[in-house]
Image (spheres, rainbow, N blue to C red):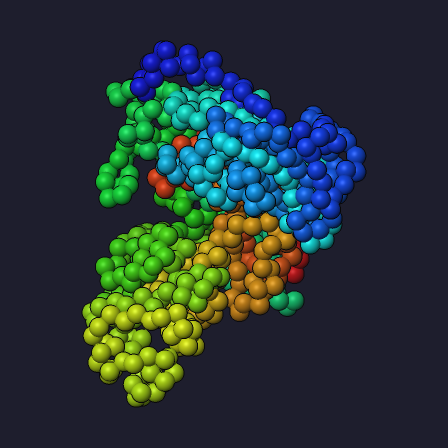
Amino acid sequence: MGYWKAGITSSSLAVLAACSVGQSSTTVFDVEQLTSQGYYRSNSSILSYSQLNNQPAARISFGGLWSQIGVNYASPQNWSTYDGFRMTFKNEETRPVTIGVQWDVSGTTAPAVGAPITLRPLETRTIFLDFTGITPDQHGIHAPIPALTDYYSHQYPATPNVATHTVHKFQVYSKESAPARVSLTSVKAVVTDSSITAFVDVFGQLSRRSWSWKVSSAQQIRDAHDDELAELAANPGKGEELGSSTLPTTPYMGKWRVVRTQSGKAYFLSPTGKYFWSLGLCQVIPAPATITQNREYMFAMLPPEGTPKAQFYSTTTKNGASVKTYSHYAGNIYDKYGEEWPTKYRQHAATRMRSWGFNTVGTASSVWDMANQGLPFTVTLTTADYPTRLTTPFAYWRSLPDPFGADFPAWLQANLASQLGNLKNNPNLLGVFVDGENSWGMRTGTTRERYQVPLSALAAPASQPAKQAFVNHIFVKYRTIEALNQAWGTNFASWHTMRTTTVTLTDPQVELASPDFTAFLFNYVKVYAFRVRQAVKSLNQDILWLGTREFMAWAPNEVFSALQHYADTISVTHYDRSEDVPWNYFNALKRPVLISEFTFAAREGNSMSQLILQRCETSTQAGRAALAASYLDKALTSKNVIGCHWFTYIDQPISGKFNGENNAFGLVDVTDRPYTEMVSMFRSVSNTMYSRRGL
């Protein structure tokens, strides 16, 4: 089968092959010269010298805030030909430690630019501090293209477009009030290959990096599949897809239920009457695609039209326009199975899930493909097409449906029924989510950010149902416009003025109005939840409404307080390490909590350094498995948590999904190779899941 070389000439390929990433460098801070002329210490001391990642390192004791170690250059240094700094640090403390690096381009005592670096307890991290000014968003991706051939954390200076042409001083300093011990290597300024040309190979892998399991032929994919089939046959799973085989079976059968044990632990009950804790896997789909149109230069090779793999071209909508996409993963699946790939893919995914210990097909999966594989599954329904919307200043995915619209109940019933179809009667339907990661407001931040729903309602035109509902709400409370003006510090002429004009408030007025804002936000979500529940139950009275998959960083408390009146579970997407998850908050909610997305990534293999979710990143697959195991253990021992769903089954394309996400969150990579460390961890957790949780 031939492949089209996507705009890459033989001469440019030769240049790429000749370029060794990071081959040119200079040492800007030398740990082997810390006692030499020009180097200085302030409230810090050298404890010892050692090795860190096979590099000379110095172990430094920082005495407190702004204690530092640095170098004053005899003459100004010009680093403008370099792309960034490479450095490695190790936190020698059992608590998090934040250090910083900064350099002075003015020749005065005021540093020009710097970058804070927070290290986890005992963490070792190699960092590339990028001062090229080129960000991944410019290429339509979230995680940056690797600047170094090995594994590292990518960071940017606190000040963009930094000056590096006349540097007088460089220093490493502590941002801790307490003393802290940190080991560090020399700091090198390096030249990198910042070109995005042909960085994706024919299989969807990073072309500029090698790793032990990297695929170089379709035959390797088929051979690995044969080996995996034997491994799966030897490890078929415990057969607990419909609940625990060790906890007692209850007499409550025939449908899915949410229950609590006598000790208060939340469980599902399956239609077989068994206790069921949902261990789910999200995005079980065969085709996570990447945009190729107008980005052909990113790909070393793409299949020509008219060839078998051209079936994996498709389209998506980007900025209102239809653009062409391609799925390398689906192409690799085709290499594995041939023309029978759709059936064999579904069967193999289900076999894997059973073997690995998963019992639930999670959100964003191809449920019409997976619904008949004998596994419980969820369906995500949406109100995105409801025409009456409330537009808020922060709308990550989309604007909000206006639940006060008179036609909202009828629209919900008709459209949710159409979306769910005959799946409503499938006995393995665990439940439905409706919407996800809604733009209710910011959980943290300013009062204005938190209460964007009531503020947007006030700013809306008179035709907005939510605006009229809000004015009605405060009219019942205050009765006179004078009383409202006194409470809010405003000077509205009449209630009619509020109803018919767009209203904006100053920050002081927002603070004064916040008690009314919290009441209206609660009411807005409660009306939404009431109408959604009515619509879901009209499809089939036995269907569980699993909630709205709220992103914890965005959803104020009022959202959860309102949802728990009508949702069967409170579902959240939560990305953090186990020690930073609000388990006590989850346990205090009246409804059980289903964590519908959690994940971790490793800077290893076909992966790029995180920028958005650095707290969910670690160096190796083994470290990633340890983080996930810790998270699951806390979830299993939290009485109100009813399940956890891993995001995702497949790594996202390194060249980005439609929205730029290009994270290695999967349990299999783009060539469909499982990450064995993660598989072993999930098997281990699932084998003892019910004994660990108990009744």
Q: Residue at x 35, y 51 (%)?
A: 397
Image quadrant in which the C terminus is located: bottom right
In the displayed image of the protein, which residue is found farthest to the right? Answer: 47
Side of 591 where 475 appears, left or right: left
* Vertical order, 307 against 476 (above or below): above
Residue 65: percent from left, percent from top: 67, 51
Of residues 594 and 194, the one nearer the viewer is 194
Count up the numbered dots. Answer: 0
Image quadrant in which the N terminus is located: top left
Q: Residue at x 31, y 19 (%)?
A: 7
Which of the 4 quarters of the picture holds residue 461? Answer: bottom left
On the question of residue 189 being in view, the answer is yes
Residue 422: percent from left, percent from top: 32, 51
Side of 448 where 295 appears, left or right: left
Residue 309: percent from left, percent from top: 33, 23
Side of 461 where 173 appears, left or right: right
Q: Residue at x 38, y 20 (%)?
A: 300
Of residues 209 and 63, the one nearer the viewer is 63
* Vertical order, 343 against 577 (above or below): above
Q: Residue at x 52, y 28 (%)?
A: 78
Which of the 4 quarters of the picture holds residue 467? Answer: bottom left
On the question of residue 405 being in view, the answer is no
Which of the 4 quarters of the picture holds residue 136? Answer: top left
Residue 275: percent from left, percent from top: 58, 57
Of residues 349 and 140, the one nearer the viewer is 140
Of residues 664 and 219, the one nearer the viewer is 664
* Vertical order, 461 against 161 (above or below): below
